């Protein structure tokens, strides 16, 4: 969690991550599994890891708006 807070609140750490993600993750002390989650860029996986709760599944097909066909 501290890694994400730093990315959101510390411009220098965010810039360092943009320049060299591996070095920034190592400096933050992320283990291999945590690094894989960050590198996945999968919002669901990241959210689940941060909150320890899963997001509800997305609908299988787009839902039409009322009055639209």
Image (cartoon, rainbow, N blue to C red):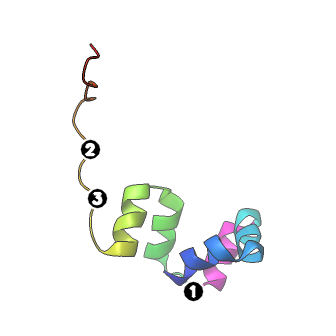
Name the residue at 28% across, 58% down: 55
Q: Determine which quarter of the picture holds residue 3.
A: bottom right
Q: Residue furthest top?
A: 69
Disc sitting over residue 38 in the figure: none
- The span picked out in magenta is 20-28
Give coordinates of residue 65: x percent, y percent: 28, 25
Name the residue at 37% across, 57% down: 44
Disc sitting over residue 29 in the figure: 1
| Residue hosting label 2 | 58
Residue 11 placement, left or right of 67 = right
Secondary structure beneath disc 2? loop
**First in residue order: circle 1 vs circle 2:** 1
Task: Give the foreground label among 1 and 2.
Answer: 2
Residue 7's place in the image compared with 2, above or below, is above
Q: Residues within 10 Å of mark 2 (few under 14, many from 20)?
A: few
Residue 42 placement, left or right of 8 = left
Residues under labels 2 and 3: Cα distance? 9 Å
């Amino acid at each position: 969690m501290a890694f994400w807070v730093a990315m959101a609140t510390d411009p220098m750490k965010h810039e360092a991550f943009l320049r060299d993600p591996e070095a920034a993750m190592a400096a933050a002390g992320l283990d291999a599994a945590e690094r894989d989650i960050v590198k996945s860029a999968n919002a669901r996986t990241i959210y689940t890891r941060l909150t320890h709760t899963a997001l509800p599944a997305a609908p299988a097909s787009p839902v039409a708006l009322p009055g639209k066909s």
